[in-house]
Amino acid sequence: MIDRMLWSRLAVAAGDADAGDLTRLVDSDLYILVGVTGVGKTTALQAVGDRLELCVLPDRRSVADEVILPAAQALEGESPSPVADRVERFRLTARYRDRHHGGIAEALASLAFTGSERRVLFFDGLRGAAECGWAATHLPRASFVVLEAPTAIRLQRLLGRRSDFDRAPVALDVTVAGSLLERVPGLADLLSETELGRVLAVAQAAGTSSVDVAEKAAIIVAEARNYDTGEAISILRSELAEKRLLVVDTSDTAPDAVGHCIAKWIRRSRLGAELL
């Protein structure tokens, strides 16, 4: 079962000061999902929730909306306002990291919640080496679950989920893979023409427009400029004991099996044994 913690239970705890009736996240047994768009974080978390009682913190998007984006806009002399364009969100979060090198991990570490929490506490999620490295150092009781999948599979999943959040300012009506690679700068570094051709064929069979493919491809490219899962895994492996890190390739594993794998790992871990 999944219970989602509301912002009404959360507050910013100042440094090492007495938090009163608040429990700081830096002092908590926290599980953190790591992975870029389309690796299956939401689906995996739901599958874990079918096996364990979870308390899930406000997710990355919510923390960005409440903390990161307003701070980044203030750095640029702008008034806080909602940001729907995902490419612009990547730019603003990068701007925030210029001042706060841990990015969203720093925002997470500043939070505390009212009361205590005996259920498995999860956050979804961190991305990239900078965030993960900072969290590994400054969240000493946190454990990390990294999900990964090839770019072509992630793009296909992104097309399939049809979320209003997945928007970018792209208007290319291109049906040929080679032309799309040329007109979405950086895409050729992530996908071959053959791989993109397969994605386009599946998209066209499903009635998805090539404009939608170009838009989602632009999101994948923008994200890749800021976050590298391979580098994140490397730094976590160098910083953490094995019992604090689990890496799962979701490309050839069913969601239910991914959930089973994560839940089994939590149960076997020292932190999980204390919580359950």
Image (cartoon, helix red, strand yellow):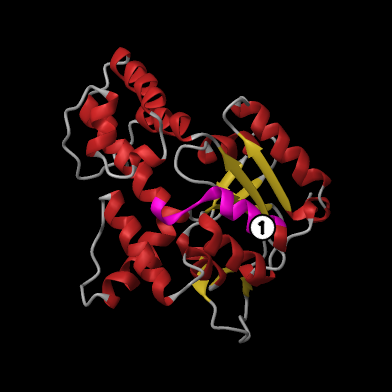
Res 147 → quadrant: top right
Q: Residues within 10 Å of mark 1 (few under 14, many from 20)?
A: many
Mark 1 residue type: Leu
Q: Position of residue 19 (x, y in %)?
A: 61, 80
26 part of magenta stretch: no
Q: Is residue 247 above or below residue 177?
A: below
In the image shown, does 167 or 187 lie closer to the viewer? 187
Horizontal relation, residue 118 to residue 62: left or right:
right
Residue 120 screen position, x and y as percent? 69, 51
* 120 lies left or right of 211: right
Which residue appears farthest toward the top when viewing the image? 205
Please tell me whether residue 17 is drawn above or below residue 167 in the rendered image. Answer: below
Depth check, front residue: 175 or 43: 175
x%, y% of residue 75? Answer: 29, 77
Figure label count: 1
- State which quadrant residue 178 falls in: top left
| Magenta region | 225-237
Report helix, strand or loop for mark 1: helix
**x, y percent for residue 248:** 65, 38
Say whether residue 128 is visible.
yes
Residue marked by disc 1: 236
Observer able to see residue 165: no
Q: Is residue 22 above or below residue 9?
A: below
The residue that appears at 83% across and 45% down in the rendered structure is: 268
